[in-house]
Amino acid sequence: MSSDKSKLKVIFDKYSKSLTELIKNVSDDVKSEDEKTHLDQIKRLIRLCPQEERLIKTKDTIWDLKNYILTRDHVGLKNLDATNYMNKDNTDEEKQFILSIIDIIKSRYDDLEENKKNNYWTILTLLLQYVIEYRQLVKDF
């Protein structure tokens, strides 16, 4: 059991780092002061959230988006109503956090350089990978 706990800690750590990297990339692409302020609020919310909760609260959304992520289906993701993919147990603040990141990426995607697009897909793929590892370890099927 101790081994599982240490594996979980590694997964939570990797997920948190990837989530932070995703937000950093979104922050780099944001131009308006309102969006910058909103992202600063998201960053504070994430810092207050325990590391394990970052994955637990967002895993269902990432899992539901797996087909878009695996196929890099930017058209499907852009047309997606993200509110349909939210974990029903999440609070409004948690929903807003995920929705904000998805919406900002969707709104900027067509204007991004190819390397930035690839970077977003790489990070989303890593988040999905950690969700899969977590679900396998805790037998969340």
Image (tube, helix red, strand yellow):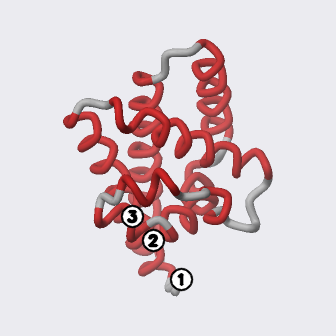
- Distance, label 3 to label 1, CA atoms, is 21 Å
Report if the CB atoms under discs 1 and 2 are less than 8 Å apart.
Answer: yes
Circle 1: element type: loop
Task: Report the residue at 27% width, 34% height from top.
Answer: 116
Name the residue located 65 percent from the left edge and 26 percent from the top edge: 38
Q: Nearer the viewer, residue 117 or 123?
A: 117
Q: Residue at x 47, y 47 (%)?
A: 16
Residue drawn at x 41%, y 22% as measured from the top left: 28
- Name the element at disc 3: helix
* Mark 2 surroundings within 10 Å by alpha-carbon count, few (fewer than 14), some (14 through 19), many (20 or more): many
Question: Where is residue 40 shown, x and y percent of the image?
Answer: 61, 23
Whichever of labels 3 and 1 marks the residue nearer the N terminus, that label is 3
What is the three-letter code of the residue carrying label 2? Answer: Tyr
> Mark 1 highlights which residue?
140
User: How far is the residue under mark 1 from the one under mark 2?
Assistant: 8 Å
Q: Is the residue 134 above or below the residue 110 in the image?
A: below
Residue identifier under label 3: 68
- 43 left or right of 7 in image: right
Q: Secondary structure at mark 2?
A: helix
Q: Give the mark toward the camera: 3 or 1.
A: 3
Residue 99 percent coordinates (x, y): 62, 47
Q: Percent from the top left, x then y, of residue 8?
A: 46, 65
Residue linked to disc 2: 134
Q: Position of residue 111 (x, y in %)?
A: 34, 30
Please tell me how crowded label 1 is: few (under 14), some (14-19), or many (20+) other residues with Cα within 10 Å: few
Q: Is residue 120 left or right of residue 51?
A: left
* Residue, far left: 115
